[in-house]
Amino acid sequence: VNVLFRPIDKIIGVLESYPKGIAGFKRFTELVDTEPDITDSPNARRVSGLKGNIAFDHVDFAYGEDRPTLSDITLGIKAGETVALVGPSGAGKTTICSLLPRFYEIDAGAITIDGIDIREMTQDSLRSQIGIVQQDVFMFGTSIRDNIAYGRLGASDEDVMDAARKAQFDTVIAQMPEGLDTMVGERGVKLSGGQKQRLAIARIFLKNPPILILDEATSALDTATEVQIQQALAKLSQGRTTLVIAHRLATIRNADRIVVVDGGRIVEQGGHDELLRKNGAYAVLHNAQFGAWAAE
Ligand code: ATP
């Protein structure tokens, strides 16, 4: 299961005219309210302009008491580097990603960004440095403008359109009846899956964080849309430290490093060719997932 985020009902108070199906939402995209059981330490400091050097240092984590979810995770990611997390379902990839914005408190070890322990940062400022793109895109029943700009309310139309352009979402806006003022949702236009994805990418261009978490879609979009989204994501990750839960061979091959997670542990890491030659966990996964292609 992919449960990066807490239930949406925690923020329902701030949402107007949201569809009734909201209780069914299991997670939401980079809309980060304060976790009630995680509080800022009294000495927590605001961070900004981080470079994005990430280090997990012997991190243990369990959701419950019964068994560990992650054990002894040690992983360094240099600023600007793209790391692809791969591994079987339930391995712990999503959990690793959810610890970075501190959605959960770790049981042992430390996570630092630019050498600063994330527990010493205010949660708000920590999360302002991280952009998250997931398969389910959370939409507000407001205008296209506000949907793009909610991470940076008050952004100028010029900046909103610039972000939309980078995400290849400007052509969608151009076709809308009232441009940026077009309402989304029940009483407005309905966006397709691919359009929502690009809107989500535009949000992050506008927010401009140094760190990116990508939960790559497994569901198929048509080829043209797929290409647009891949291009937009490639551009988005440029110059940002990127942690991607990767499902596509192209993403995995293009990553600077592949990290194989299994049973809550990092079992292998390296480049695609290097790991294939090793004929270990990655080779097994790769052949199971992409064997048919490789044989072509
Ligand atoms: P997938 O590829 O299927 O998304 P994953 O590698 O991302 O899997 P995680 O979602 O991190 O794996 O799950 C790791 C383990 O933690 C699984 O056993 C899962 O059932 C459990 N788990 C995940 N989220 C929660 C949660 N919110 N509460 C309790 N257990 C959870």
Image (tube, rainbow, N blue to C red):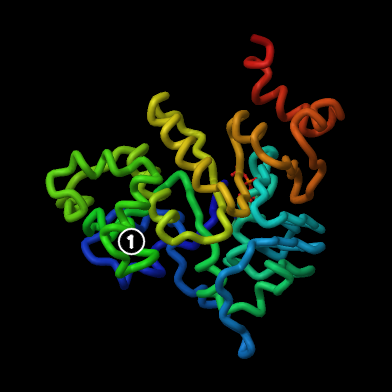
286 left or right, relative to 3:
right
* Left or right: where 207 falls relative to 13: right
Q: Position of residue 189 (x, y in %)?
A: 19, 45
- For disc 1, does the CB lie below 8 Å from ligand 1? no
Residue at 39 percent of width and 64 percent of height: 151
Say which residue appears at 50% left-offset and 43% top-offset.
Answer: 235
Determine which residue is flagged by label 1.
149
Residue 56 is drawn in which quadrant?
Answer: bottom right
Q: Quadrant of residue 220?
A: top left
- Decide: is 43 above or below 224: below
x, y percent for residue 50: 61, 68
Q: Residue furthest top?
A: 296
Image: 32 above or below 235: below
Q: Is residue 287 left or right of residue 134?
A: right
Q: Residues within 10 Å of mark 1 (few under 14, many from 20)?
A: many
* Residue 184 horizontal/vertical position (percent): 22, 51
Q: Nearer the viewer, residue 186 or 210?
A: 210
**Outermost residue, left side:** 177
> Does residue 223 appear left or right of residue 272 in this picture?
left
Q: Is residue 296 above or below residue 114?
A: above
User: SS at mark 1?
Assistant: helix
Percent x, y of residue 231: 47, 36
Q: Residue at x 72, y 62 (%)?
A: 61
Where does the C terminus fall, quadrant-wise? top right
Picture residue at 77% right of the left edge, 36% below the top: 271
In the image, 213 versus 26, the foreground residue is 213
Where 42 falls versus 79 (above or below)? Answer: below
Tell me which amino acid carries mark 1. Answer: Ala
- The total of numbered circles placed on residues is 1
